Image (spheres, rainbow, N blue to C red):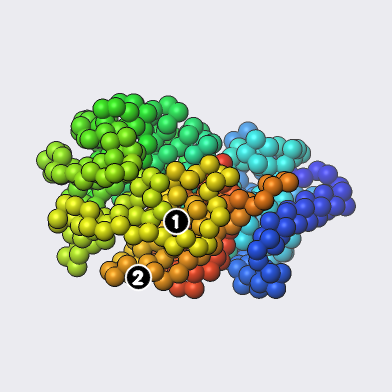
Amino acid sequence: MMRTKRATLLLVFCAATTSSLYSETKELSTTVPPAEQAAASSTQTPALSFEFFKTKVQPIFLKNRAEHARCYGCHVQPGRIFRLEPLSPGNTDWTDAQSQRNFQSASEVVVPGDPASGQLLLHPLAPEAGGDPFHSGGRQFASQNDPDWLVIAEWVRGVRAATSESAPITRVYVTNSASDTIDAIDPATNKVVQVIRGIELPHGIGFSPDGTRIYVSSEAESVLDVVDRKSGEILKKIPLSARPNNLAITKDGSQVLVGIRSQPGVLDVIDATSLQKVKSIPVDGPVHNVYVTPDGKYAVCGSLENKTATVVDLHSQQVAWQVKFDRPVRPMAFETNPDGSTSRIFVELSTVHGFAVVDFAKRAEVARIKLPDQPGGFGIAEGRTGVPSHGIGVTPDGKSLWVNSTLSNAVFKYSLPDLKLIGHSALPEVHPLGHAPTGAVPEWIAFTPDSKLIYVSDSAARLVSVIDTQTLQEVARIPVGEVPKRIKTLVLQ
């Protein structure tokens, strides 16, 4: 692939790597001491697997890719920064000893744990997909969704050949609401491992039960985009009644429920088999957020304009009951009874620095919890005093409730079921040139299935914060796209 002289490429590679490492270290050093940075780096850098390289990555270099010469054709030549061993006459694969040398050569042009760095992945990648400006071997990979590129990225992230294909895989997806991208994060490495492109102003996100499809509501086009998870390709655009906001998936995966953000207020129902809109359920007011209760029996819609939470019976597809509030309704979270039925709904409201507690059986608000005043000092410069608290979630184990605070630039932890305040974790600050630091403006919350990590989308900082739920310490910051908001976890069995 690479025809440039070894010495020249080596200088370019070193300069690019040094620049990348410098920028990442500079950003993190504002809050994390150097000793902790070094410790984190040493503990999180994965080892590269020789077996995975030999069985999964190495065959790519011999592959006849459409309209491209094989990588082997160039990289078998002397003087290449990435050098492949010449095949013995009559052989179509390398010996173990040759593969070891190929492995060593490839290892020198990657950054373990970080597919976004290192020449092996960036040099043959098309420039418009984030690759280098020019590669003498051509644009071998048109996008970061290319299956072969993804295989090499898996190796760089530390995936091992011995890993069972049936073992559960977790991904945390975040929609970048001011862009046309969705980032997929691997919690094992806390790195972005896939970028889905081409959905302008993505809002809500959900998944088919088998994980093969991703559903995304597009505000710009007023459609529900159906995406192939593996390739990132858009399979279909389903027209909606009007501009959508959030969405939810029924527990059996048979229907996608999309909240429509215009008067008079409906919940569009998409059949997951035919991929057609089959019904629009009238609700009380334009829908901002919609959820399916953990038992799968109800959908709950929140309206900003009508200050209402509407509960829809999914069996009859009729409104069952509703709760009126004195403020516009924003994100919600659900607590379950031992039998799996819904116990309480925790509801965030505009201008309320805290949340309301709704007793599901009583069908009424029974309490309102105010978040602490300290820490404080944020929200004014960001123009977000009307949304002091946005983003709320119950851990999968049901033991704690987490609540974002824009005014505190923090996320607070409460124990369940007693709603006792446990503490908070500070979120990153943004440092505008010539101005005082401002807040991250947290928007949404997701968890790993084991409840050990919480992921917070920091819309102003273009980051996702990763926090240990026991220590309340931030353990990673993941750069993502413009104004990240909705964030959701997918577990693949």
**Where, quadrant-wise, is the N terminus in this rendering?**
top right
Neighbour tally class for label 2: few under 14, some 14-19, many 20 plus, Cα within 10 Å: few
Residue 420 - label: 2
- The location of residue 49, given as percent across then percent down, is 60, 66
**Left or right: 355 with respect to 107?**
left
Residue at x-position 64% and y-position 52%: 437
| Badge 1 amino acid | Asn
Question: Nearest the camera: 404 or 144?
Answer: 404
- The location of residue 111, given as percent across then percent down, is 68, 59
Tell which circle, 2 or 1, labels the residue nearer the N-terminal end.
Answer: 1
Q: Is 216 located above or below residue 222 in the figure?
A: below
- The location of residue 91, given as percent across then percent down, is 65, 55
Say which residue label 1 marks: 404
| Badge 2 amino acid | Lys
Question: Nearest the camera: 375 or 189?
Answer: 375
Judged by depth in the image, the label closer to the viewer, 2 or 1, is 2
Question: Nearest the camera: 355 or 78?
Answer: 355
Residue at x-position 77% and y-position 45%: 2
Residue at x-position 71% and y-position 60%: 25
Neighbour tally class for label 1: few under 14, some 14-19, many 20 plus, Cα within 10 Å: many
Q: Is 69 located above or below residue 358 in the figure?
A: above
Local secondary structure at mark 2: strand
Local secondary structure at mark 1: strand
Q: Please identify the quarter of the rendering in which residue 304 is found.
A: top left
**Where, quadrant-wise, is the C terminus in this rendering?**
bottom left
Q: CA distance from mark 2 to mark 1?
A: 16 Å
* Visible residue check, residue 374: yes
- The location of residue 29, given as percent across then percent down, is 70, 62
